[in-house]
Structure formats: C-alpha cells, structure tokens
Amino acid sequence: MALTEVSTTDSDDSHNKTIYEYSSSERAGVICISVAGLLSLTAILFLMIFRTPKPRTYQRTHLYGYVMSLFLACTLQSVGTVMNLKWVLRRQVEYGLFCAYQGAIKHFGNISIALWSFMISLHLFHLLFMRGTITHMTFWFQIILGWSVVNLFVIIGPLAIEKEDRGPYYGISGPWCWITSDYPKEQVYLEYFFEFFSAGLSLILYSIVILRVRGNIIQSDGNWCLRIVPRGQSWQLSFGRDLIDSAMLRVAQNMVWYPFAYTVLLIPITITRLTHFGGHDVPFGVTIFADVVFNLTGFVNAIMLLVTTKLFPDMSTIPDFRTKRNKHLTVYLGRHGGVTPFTLERSETAESWEQGRMAAVERQVSRSTDNDGTSTPEMTDVSSNGGRPRTPLLE
C-alpha cells in the first residue's frame, strides 16, 4: 500500500490528487454521515458494556459467535465513518497514512457485515431447515476462515492489485477515503458484489426457513412438498406443530430481522450506485442520504438485539432441534389439506343426566330437613366447576 505522503500536483489525474476541498454543502453532508456512524458506534458500545448479550441465550445454536462477529463488523464500519470528522474539521480530505487506513477500515467493515449477515442466514438454514448441527471445531473453523477471507480481500488490493501508474488503491474517493476511482472494477467485485449477494441470498434462505418451520414445506418419503394454505385457515399449519417446531419458528421469526434490516438499509445506496454505473449523475444530497442510512446499520442491529433477545425462546427448556420426532400426523395433514374444523352439538342425554342428579340432591335435602325438623339452607353443588355453584341447565 502506498502509505507515504505523495507530493501535491496540479494534474487532473485522480491518482495524483492529494487534496479534496469541501464545499459548504459537502461538509454538511459529511457531518451527517459522521453523526450516523457515531450514533451506531455509541449504540454498539452501550450494548456491549451495559447490556452484554449472554451466550446461554443462543445455546445449542452457535448463533452467539456469529452475532458477535456481526457486531464487530458494525463497529469497524462505524469507526471508519467517524474518522471523517478529521476531514470535517480541516474542511478538506488529505491523502496520507490516515486516509489510507480509513479506506481500508471502511472496506473491511462493509464486506465483513455482508459476510456475517450471510453466515447467520446460512447457519439458521442448516439448523432449522436441514435440521442439522455443527461441531465446535467446525464453528471455530468458520469463524477463523471468515475473518481470514475478509482480511484477504482488504490486503489483496494494495499488495497485488495496486499499480504505480494507477495510483494508490486506498485513497481519496470523493469527499472521504476508500478504494479510489482508478479501481472501479475492484469497487464492484470486491465490495458491492458481496453486499448485494449477501442481502439477496439471505432473504431467499430466510424465506425458505420460515416456510419450513411454519409447516408450508414438509418432507414426506424423501420428497419435499409445498402446502399453500389461505390466510383464514393458517390454523391448519399449527395443528401438527410440537414444542420444538414452535421454538424453531420463534427463532426464525426473531433472526429474520437481521438480513431484512440489512437489505432495507442497503437499498438506497444500491440505487445510487447502480444509477452511477449506468452513467447518470446522482445528486449529492441523494448520495448523502443513502450513506447516512447505510451507516445506521450498527444502530439498527443494536436495537434489534435488545428487542429480539427478550422474545427469544428459553433454549434451556427446549429439546435439541435434532431430536427425532414422529411427524406422521403432519405428513398426513400435508397430503390431505389439513383437518376440517368441527363443533359439538348440544347433548340432550347430558341434560337429562344433570336434571336427574339435581333432583336426587333436592330429595336428599328434603329428607334431611324432615328428619331434623329444621330448615336447611338451599344447597348447591360445588363438587366441580372450580368451587363455583353449578346452575342446572333446566329447573
């Protein structure tokens, strides 16, 4: 990486540009982006210090490690964004060590968020759809491999791709520092592609998982079947759902918000980037809005963690998700479209029996009154009905 200060030149070539002076509107826009990054960083630090997630919340799932990796990625992204405050104070971006490191940190944070958002989706797909699990060794291998891949994508630019005639790989890229515009393909394939891939595939995986744990997708004799149930008859899906199925559904319903939020936050910046790639000019205000939204990723994830942790099922009271269960009822219901609801008609036999019982009680009361020569208060049957007097159906 070209980390030494390069000399200022009057050339218009972007790789020779060492200073980018802010206009008043650009400075205001960068301040907004920095505030968004600072808000995300503050939310994450507050969460980790005062409301630290507990591993037991996600026991038997390995989700704790993936979620912590995601928040570490969000922290790095926020740090890279907050570094813009130096340029705000100086009213200009200056190429140098600080600029190069900011570009690398922002790149590292962005692609690691994409990676760990996808890994959470993939793990839940394996756990809830395939009903499988991974060993601790496999889990740690995935964690080490994931961060190693992110590091590789960050260092490969300055070590293998950067060319002297094209200038520094990480440097001034508009009103901040990132991969410079002299490496447009690298911007697309080494960051944008992974962000789009992560968001799109994660939503697909979660959609399939939700259908599986709800009961829309079932497996019978080695074949997968899709059940389409009208909204008004969704109770059919819960008919054959046991404790483990219900817990799986709650896990999926809580964790699905992470890729969903990431996709929503990514939409504005995706539109601006695709518009720019199409050769159209993007208003600076639109670019700032998209970057502000994207840099709120850490803040949104922190809020979701606080909310979903309270709604997460108590995993210590739930059998292992791999527990073998008899699902013949569910398969039968899936093949025959569920069950037909029914109602119980009024039973004349039961009413006759109740009348006879009450008559016998009244006769017994009468005999007791005649024998004792005293008046006995009216008796009521409290042997059932929770201790409350039972009113006869007919008198």
Image (cartoon, helix red, strand yellow):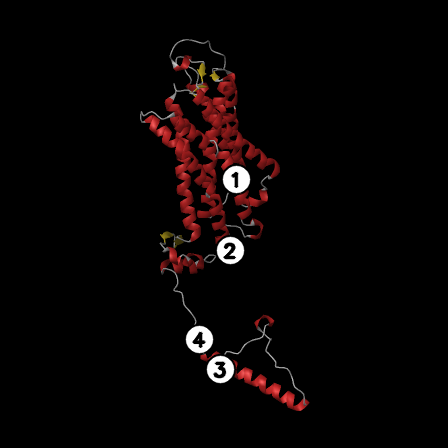
The span from disc 3 to disc 2 (Cα, nearest Å) is: 41 Å
Q: Name, please, the residue furthest toward the front.
A: 24
The span from disc 4 to disc 1 (Cα, nearest Å) is: 52 Å
Give x and y (percent) for residue 59: 56, 45
On screen, residue 285 above or below 182: below
Decide which of tag 3 and tag 2 comes sooner along the chain: 2
Residue 243 marker: 2
Residue at 42% from the left image edge and 30% from the top image edge: 289
Residue at 58% from the left image edge and 83% from the top image edge: 361
- Tag 4 secondary structure: loop
Q: Name the residue type under label 1.
A: Ile
Judging by the rendered image, the residue that carries numbered circle 4 is: 346
Examine the image and state in which quarter residue 330 appears. bottom left
The span from disc 2 to disc 1 (Cα, nearest Å) is: 28 Å
Judging by the rendered image, the residue that carries numbered circle 3 is: 352
User: Of discs 2 and 1, which sits in the foreground?
Assistant: 1
Judging by the rendered image, the residue that carries numbered circle 1 is: 303
The span from disc 1 to disc 3 (Cα, nearest Å) is: 61 Å
Determine crowd level at label 1: few under 14, some 14-19, many 20+ residues with C-alpha closer than 10 A: few
- Tag 1 secondary structure: helix
| Residue 130 visible in rendering | no
Q: Nearer the viewer, residue 378 or 84?
A: 378
Determine crowd level at label 2: few under 14, some 14-19, many 20+ residues with C-alpha closer than 10 A: few
Determine crowd level at label 3: few under 14, some 14-19, many 20+ residues with C-alpha closer than 10 A: few
